[in-house]
Amino acid sequence: MHLKTIRSTGLALAATLLGMAPAFAVTDGDLDGNTHPYVGLMVAQDAKGTPLWRCSGTLLSPTIYLTFPRMWELREITDPAELPTQLPAEGVIQLTDPATGQVRSFRRVASLFDDTTTFFIDHKRWAVWNLVHLGGPAHPIHIHMSQFQMLTRRAFENVTPFDIAVGGTNQPLATPVEGLSIEKYEEGWKDVFRVQPGEWVTVAGEFAGATGEFMYHCHILDHEDEGMMRPFVVHPSEVARFHVHPGGDHGHS
């Protein structure tokens, strides 16, 4: 079977990529039936057949193997002059806001752990986090430092406008519909939220416990080790007054 490796993308505050039908997983060379849909192991060998390295990943189709997912941090494009003249464009996502029915455009500003920190939150301020997942396996997202409550869970009926090869939408994603009901065990204060492919989950929490640099990440070990982890900063109010970010907003949602 020929496997084509492509760049992985995703959103945090929007997560990974468009997934296809479940596939058999390969664990250390053995097919494991459908026990772990989408999960695979790629092994590189030398001419003698000696393994050189191996990498876990996601089977998007029989011919596309995603080496690892990523999270994107997005910043809204508010100036029409900054919109690309042609879509899809790499790193540009358009979606329809369910609260207003208006199309909103976003640009990727970070995806790797070492990229510049873009999330700054004032100490003792509340923040709403939007977690949008455009396909692939489910991700349990863990946000450090605070406790949160899930506000909404919506679902996109069609995510095909997201062009996997380019890494952007060719037209706005339609307004998401109401998703699965929030279960009893999901109510109350949590710091890990399971986000299924095609979902848009919003959570809210107060960042009052401490100040400094913290992390949020996928709680699947392979995923966080391979890049699904990003920092954010909680500022004391005295510092935040002198630390203005693009858009002039300290809190992010």
Image (spheres, helix red, strand yellow):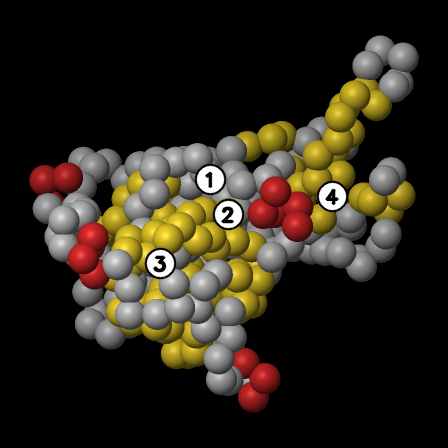
Q: Report the mark closest to the observer, 3 or 1.
A: 3
Task: Name which of mark 3 and mark 1 comes first in the sequence.
Answer: 1
C-alpha distance separating marks 4 and 1 = 23 Å
Q: Position of residue 190 (x, y in %)?
A: 51, 75
Q: Secondary structure at mark 1?
A: loop
Task: Name which of mark 2 and mark 1 comes first in the sequence.
Answer: 1
Tags 2 and 1 in contact by the CB under 8 Å rule? yes
Label at residue 40: 4
Q: Report the mark closest to the observer, 3 or 4.
A: 3
Task: Read off the residue under disc 3.
Answer: 211
Task: Read off the residue under disc 2.
Answer: 229
Are there few (<14), some (14-19), or many (20+) residues within 10 Å of tag 2? many
Tags 4 and 1 in contact by the CB under 8 Å rule? no
Task: Read off the residue under disc 1.
Answer: 113
Task: Name which of mark 2 and mark 4 comes first in the sequence.
Answer: 4
Tags 3 and 1 in contact by the CB under 8 Å rule? no
Q: Secondary structure at mark 3?
A: loop
